[in-house]
Amino acid sequence: MLSGDEEAFTALYRLRQGAVYRFALQMTGSTAVAEDVTQEVFMTLIEHGNRFDPSRGTLASFLYGIARNMVLRRLEKERPTETIEDCAGEVDLLGDLTRRETIEQVRRAVVSLPPVYREAVVLCDLQDVSYQDAAVALDCPVGTVRSRLNRGRSMLVKKLGLVKKLGFAEPVRAAEGTG
Amino acid sequence: MNPEQAVLKALHALGESDRDRQASPEAEARLKLAFRHRRTVRKWRRMSALAIAAGVVVALFAIYARGPRRIERVPVRQPTETASAIPVPGASRAAASAPVIKARTRHRAQPEIVTDFFPLMDVPPPIGRGALVRVNLPAEAMRSVGLPVREDGLSERVQADVLLSEEGMATAIRFVKVF
């Protein structure tokens, strides 16, 4: 591809663009931004593809890394004026996870996470990327990926109101109550 | 089902619903166009670099064929554009104060306009001594450094000063308009 083989580039694009597009979509919740980011990632690959070092990680993690930087730049520019604190709606979240509004409710909850937790959740839980690859893409140790993932999931539990729906006591509040 | 399992189930459902989403075919078409454009630019650069190298070889041959009297040593204390215009990482002050070899040509007496120097090497060697050689090149060489050239003027000849390192390597070039 780097030597100018268009067929090789097309094959690579078709193989990888879906993952890059979905990552950007799940990070931003916007199809237009996801489309732009996908295009910019592969433009970067055309211009600076020789920066890819297979000894540092897989091509997938390299592409996720580029996509992540571009998404974060977008998020910086288009910082939302308000954050979604509670995404638990009237929909029965666990009753029917095949319904469109239920899925969109989960998507809104993910998009409302702070970016550092959101990227870990999107990569590891939505894209099924290994911790190793996620660590390369996020440029942090594997342990950090794990801790951000756990924190992100906990925040989602709260945002989706799963504790109340499932009848569990919230541990922090319970501790506060005894003190 | 505990809240952690519930959130994983919800995330899994979101991941599944997005599994087939990808960028539009228009994005692929735009990237292919960009890829072709990039390939053409690279080809032009390669050809221009070859043309510059050939011009330098011819000029060097001409200089050495005329004999050493054409070249004189001049102290750098009178700062020349050659030494000041090009940023050379790693060049020491001592090296900068060493004398440089400067080609004396008849063109100096004529009024002329020169561009800035454009580096021809990613990491130029420190300049202690060097030579400035006036060469005649096809105008397409200007494209290799990003200067605009009309399509119909690519075959016209232009004059340029090539800065040679002590080892005879072309390190930078500037284009000259002689009146």
Image: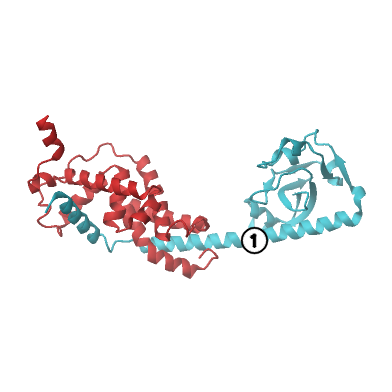
Chain colours: A red, B cyan
Q: Residue B143 vs residue A163: left or right? A: right
Most extreme residue toward the left, as rendered?
Answer: A167
Q: Position of residue B161 (x, y in %)?
A: 76, 48
Image quarter where the C terminus of chain A lies is: top left
**Which is more toward the observer, B116 or A59?**
A59
**Which is more toward the observer, B88 or A41?**
B88
- Taking the spot 28% from the left edge, 36% from the top edge, the residue there is A81
Most extreme residue toward the top, as rendered?
Answer: A179
**Which is more toward the observer, A25 or A168?**
A168
- Give amino acid for label 1: Arg
Q: Which subunit holds the residue at mark 1?
A: B
Most extreme residue toward the bottom, as rendered?
Answer: A7
Most extreme residue toward the front, as rendered?
Answer: A179
Q: Secondary structure at mark 1?
A: helix
- Taking the spot 54% from the left edge, 65% from the top edge, the residue there is A4
Vertical order, A118 against A15 (above or below): above
Q: Position of residue A99 (x, y in %)?
A: 14, 58
Residue bearing mark 1? B46
Residue A67 at least partly seen: no
Q: Residue B151 vs residue A28: left or right? A: right
